[in-house]
Amino acid sequence: MQVSHSVSAVFDDPNLVSAAGLVPVLALAERAGLHRLVAEHLTVPGSAGANTAIKIPALVAGMVAGADSIDDMGLLRHGGMDRLFSEVRAPTTLGTCLRGFRFGHVRQLDAVASRLLIALSKQAPLLAGADQVAYLDIDDTMRETHGYAKQGVGYGYSKVKGLNALLAIVSTPIAAPVIAGTRVRKGSTNSARGAARLVTDALVTARRAGATGLVTVRADSAYYGHDIVAAARRAGAHFSITARMDPAIRRAITTIGDDAWTAIKYPNAIYDEDEGRWVSDAEVAEVPFTAFTSHRTAEHVSARLIVRRVKRLNPASVPAGQSELFATYRHHAVFTDSPQPMLAAETTHRAHAIVEQVIADLKNGPLAHMPSGRFAANSAWTVLAAIAFNLTRAAGTLASTFHTKATTATIRAQLIAVPARIARSARRLRLHLPRDWPWENAWTQLFTSTCGPPVTAS
């Protein structure tokens, strides 16, 4: 493929738009009640809070189209966008709106996001199979920042300076994940801080969004604590949490007999960061275990400890003073009350890695930056990023089977960022999209599902 030598360019067509996919996506948002929910629940004072029912959907629309900063919201103001959408606001106006947020307003926006996810689940098959099995995964990530102008920045567990974002996602074995809750914390915060409250809120949202079957809360060792387990149990959910290798866990592992281990071979190798290698085979065993015995007796939790062990090949990875058992094998323990058989429960827990896909999607989109110097504004930005993620995911489920599990970047490239020319016919706007667009059928299906079939002019 080569560029034609007879090419010139000029930006002069007022009828072109670069993101025609925003039409069905925003129509879906309207059907789910985004504008109404913002008007009912968000009460930002002063001029910053004027017309939030217009400004908040505009911010979400910009994120859906690929904006990752306030200035990028300018992509909503080009060509014929003002003909497709009413009352488009300038990036400076949208930035002023965000800077007017305080902590209470962020919690109001959380309520909007929760209710919108519930409404979207009724408009699209977001959580197919959730009436049988669903998973709530929690994890956090550091969003790197530079300089000290941003409120709340600090060095976190990854030695990266920035802000800490905690996510709760819901998925099923046959449905891609959606975001049920977010929290932005100071960069130097402990990973588990506020996680129990987020689990409680996210489980309520998940239940109302259709997760009425068996729900399991999954997390890594940073969340191994009584409050997380208690939050899951109070909501009627099971838990599956990686256990830290403390003395109690080590004692429990030493009680496992040599004949209790079951050899398994992974069809897809697992990368062991401590060993620095890919692991394709291991051994698994389980033992009854009572956790949190340092708490009062009523808070002791008895469940299963499922242990996976792999042989150490790197002598440098052996901690000093270890017994022969721990010098020969590296152990990974999962504390769970899952009703599944041992091998199935261990496989289910490893699927917790799905949360990394969501984090990568967000960092490849709206969370590429924390755009404001104000902590509350960045918190609101993160909630809006979750709304945009869920809205994009809902659009993908309505478009095609492929897009149901596609990444947000793929959905954006194939269904959102589609150029179109606006024409008027019989007092109606008509979008002329590129001929031979490879994903025409999926785009048409999405458009038909959200905007309805064209009405014959009388």
Image (spheres, rainbow, N blue to C red):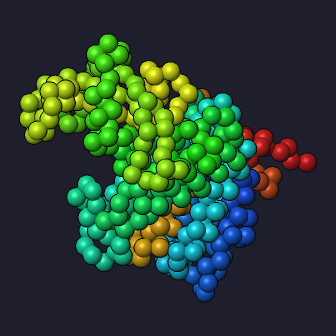
Q: Is residue 35 above or below residue 24?
A: below
Residue drawn at x 36%, y 40% as measured from the top left: 243
Instruction: Say whether residue 72 is left or right of residue 427.
Output: left
User: How many marks do you count on the picture?
Assistant: 0
- Residue nearest the observer in this picture, 259 or 423: 259
**Could you say where residue 181 lies in the image, as x and y percent from the top left?**
54, 55
Residue drawn at x 80%, y 56% as measured from the top left: 427
**Could you say where residue 375 lies in the image, as x and y percent from the top left?**
42, 73
Instruction: Say whether residue 36 is left or right of residue 244.
Output: right
Residue drawn at x 67%, y 45% as measured from the top left: 207
Residue drawn at x 61%, y 84% as measured from the top left: 45
Instruction: Say whether residue 217 is left or right of residue 267.
Output: right
- Locate the N terminus and report the quarter of the image it occupies: top left
Residue furthest to the bottom? 46
Instruction: Say whether residue 87 is left or right of residue 282.
Output: right
Asked whether residue 430 appears in the rendered view, the answer is: no
Q: Is residue 154 above or below residue 314?
A: below
Q: Is residue 34 above or below residue 330?
A: below
- Residue nearest the observer in this picture, 9 or 55: 55
**Could you say where residue 219 lies in the image, as x and y percent from the top left?**
43, 43
Residue furthest to the right? 458
